[in-house]
Structure formats: C-alpha cells, structure tokens
Amino acid sequence: MKIGFMLPMFGVMANHENMIRMAHFAENKGFESVWSPDHIVMPTKIETPYPYTKSADYIADPKGAHLEPFTSLAFIAGHTKRVKLGFTVLIAPYRNPIETAKQMASLDVLSNGRLIVGTGAGWLNEEFEALNLSPKQKWPRTDEYIRIWKELWTAEEPHFEGEFFNFSNVQCRPQPIQKPHPPITIGGNGNSCFRRVVNLADGWQVVSEGPDFTYSKGGNLESSLKILRKMSEENGRDPKTIEITVVVIAGTPEGVIRDIPRYEELGVSRLILDFPSFVSEIQEMEDMLDTVASGTRLNTN
C-alpha cells in the first residue's frame, strides 16, 4: 500500500517550521507522498453540506489558516528529493486553466517529475460566490480545464476550442517531465464524477472515514467502486488502469493499520492520512504517522 499524508497546511500548525519538519519526516520514514488541500478563501459561515462525513459538517476550522497549494508544494519540493507531491484536491474552476497548466508543469520540472495532479470541481458554494464564480458551471469548467492542461502539456503546437477558452498559435514551455503528463486523479463521488474519471483521468480520489463508511447521501466505497468499474468496462477501459486513492479523515493510527487489508481487498492502492484536521500539535501528528510507518510496509513506488 502506498501511504501519504496531508501536510500541516491549515489551522494553528500551518507555518514554515512545521512544513519543513513534516517534509523531512516523510522522506526519512518512507512515506510515498505529501498532499496539499485547496482553499483560497474560507467563509466564516458554511451552509453547504460537506459530502464526506456523517454529520455533513466540514472537518477543519474555517477560521484557521489555509496555505496556498502551489506555493506550498514548491516550498516542499525544495526541501525534499524523493517524496511525491500531490493536490487533494486542486479545485479546477477556481483558476485560469492556462496559468494553472504553466504552474503545474513548472512544479513537475523543478521537483524532477514528482507531481500528482489531484483535481476536482469543488463543493463549497460560499467560496465559489466569494470568487465571483458560478457553482452551476463547476463540472463543465473542470472538464474543459483538464483538457486544456493536457493539450498544453503534450502538444507541439497547442490548439483548443472550448466553451470557456479558445487559443492557438501559442507555446507553453516547459512541458512536464512526466510523460505524457503528471498523473491526474479526479476527486468526488457519484456517477457524474465517475464518468469524468473514466474519460479524463488516471485515477479516482475520494474522502472517507473508513473502508466501510456510509456517505451522508448513501452508498459506500465498495458500492461506488462497483459503479466506477462498471462504467469503465462499458466505455471500453480496463478498470485496473484507474488508480484508487482514499483520503482517510478519521480514526486512529491503529485503526488505519487494521483497515489496510480491507482497503487492499477493495482495490485501493493509496491512502492519504488527514491527521492535521484532528490534531493541533505537530508532535502529536508526527507520533501518529510514526505509528503507521512502524506498523505497516510502506510502498514508495
């Protein structure tokens, strides 16, 4: 099992010293990857239901700090040599896709090919409104933006005609080191998300409180995977080519170790441990991750 963890990028732990400390910890302990969430602004009052907890409440303190993901992963790249760097997830509609493609290609080059592009359409309506964006356009924009990224990353002479963006007669160099491009995982749940995973992505990323956790809107990881794999087969794609990543947002280190065989049985190949949402001391976070590292065989490939 490949195991990564969320960096201390939000709340009271979000600072220079802690980010460096956990980057070095990941390298030294053999974790596969470190991950960045994405919020630009946080509403002080959240009414949008969070889709990945039983309570439908957002798990982090909305009034706490939230470091910017591109700056943060570039910072971590400069303090590491091996560990992979991922977004969980980058909200595609929040940013100009051409500029975002440039930033991600540069990050892949400067990290020597270590970027994982976790992306999604977002869930927080109040944040969309604060950014003067329409939540109703989030999935159409996400589709188009991913296609734009791929075009700019792979084409010798990029050309694109879409609903929101059109361009030709341009170059966007450098292109990423990873070929044809950094792996793309789409986060979310439900049929709409699964169709996009099958058609646009290398993997699926989902948040869960455990391998058999039931989501607030019904269903669980096993039932979701059955739907995703069926859609994949119906579209002529081998389900085994879709990498499954689960962001674990609850539990104890011992519980994570206990649940790994069940995740493997379901076909999950990567876990991202989100301990920063539940602890406020960096030593506690490090101790929890150390317990996981000591209690399981980490896969860095």
Image (cartoon, grey):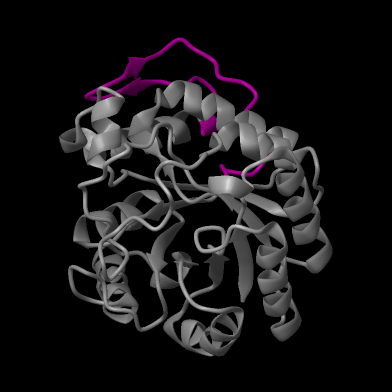
Which quadrant: the C terminus?
Answer: bottom right
Q: Quick one: which residue is furthest to the top in this view?
A: 169
Which quadrant: the N terminus?
Answer: bottom right
Q: Position of residue 277 (x, y in %)?
A: 50, 59
Residue positioned 51% across, 39% down in the render: 66
Q: Position of residue 154 (x, y in %)?
A: 53, 33
| Number of marks in picture | 0
Work out whether residue 137 or residue 39 is closer to the camera in this orientation and state it. Answer: 39
Residue 65 located left or right of residue 288: left
Magenta residues, dominant SS class:
loop
Reply yes or no: does residue 112 show up in magenta. Answer: no
Residue 163 located left or right of residue 20: left
Q: Is residue 121 above or below residue 276?
A: above
Residue 89 located left or right of residue 10: left
Reply yes or no: does residue 173 show up in magenta. Answer: yes
Q: Quadrant of residue 191?
A: bottom left
Whether residue 155 can be seen here: no
Q: Is residue 99 above or below residue 190?
A: above
Whether residue 182 can be seen here: yes
Work out whether residue 90 or residue 109 is closer to the camera in this orientation and state it. Answer: 90
Q: Position of residue 62 (x, y in %)?
A: 39, 44
